[in-house]
Structure formats: structure tokens, C-alpha cells
Image: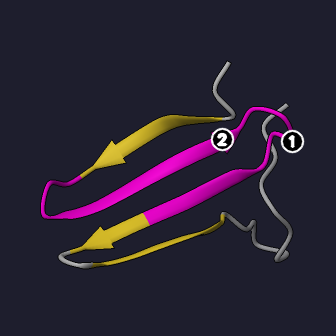
Amino acid sequence: MERFKRVYRQGTVSVTEIWIDTETGVNYVFHRDGNAAGFTPLLDQDGKPVVTP
């Protein structure tokens, strides 16, 4: 089983994706624009990580 599962994708040149860690349930945002990219936890309005049960 793969640890991370992509559940959302938008864009082609400028790409935004949401990934879920299947072991912890924590959601992550991945964003790529050209040669720059970042991967960070998705936070709720209180600044806590979004967790999918």
C-alpha cells in the first residue's frame, strides 16, 4: 500500500493537489508553478492539521 494518496488535482502549468497520508490521515497541499513547488500540511481555521478519518 502506498503511504500517500492524491485525492484532488487542479491545473496543468500551475498545479494544486491535496494528498492524504494513509497512516496518519493528515491532509497535505502540494503546489507547483513552473520549477517551484511546495508540500505542506493543510490547516483548518484554527491552525490545526486537517485529518481524514
Residue 40 drawn at (x, y percent): 62, 70
Q: In which quarter of the image is the N terminus?
A: top right
- Up/down of 4 relative to 14, above or below: above
Q: Residue 10 carries which label?
A: none
For badge 2, the amino acid type reads Ile
Residue 7 drawn at (x, y percent): 50, 34
Circles 2, 1 touching at the beta carbon (< 8 Å):
no
Give the residues drawn in magenta, as a range: 11-30
Disc 2 is placed on an element classified as: strand
Residue 29 shown in magenta: yes
The residue that label 2 is drawn on is 20
For badge 1, the amino acid type reads Thr
| Residue at 86 percent of width and 69 percent of height | 48
Kindly give the residue lying farthest to the top in the view shown.
1
Q: What secondary structure is the stretch in magenta mostly built from? A: strand
User: Does residue 6 appear left or right of residue 4 in this picture?
Assistant: left
User: Does residue 44 appear left or right of residue 34 in this picture?
Assistant: right
User: Does residue 27 appear left or right of residue 38 in this picture?
Assistant: right
Query: Colour mode?
Result: secondary structure
| Residue at 85 percent of width and 31 percent of height | 53
- Up/down of 48 relative to 21, above or below: below
Residue 38 shown in magenta: no
Labels in figure, total: 2
Q: Distance between the residues labelled 2 and 1?
A: 8 Å
| Disc 1 crowd, CA 10 A, few/some/many (<14, 14-19, 20+) | few
Disc 1 is placed on an element classified as: loop
User: Does residue 24 appear left or right of residue 21 in this picture?
Assistant: right
| Residue at 47 percent of width and 62 percent of height | 30
The residue that label 1 is drawn on is 24
Residue 49 drawn at (x, y percent): 81, 62
| Disc 2 crowd, CA 10 A, few/some/many (<14, 14-19, 20+) | many
- Up/down of 24 relative to 12, above or below: above
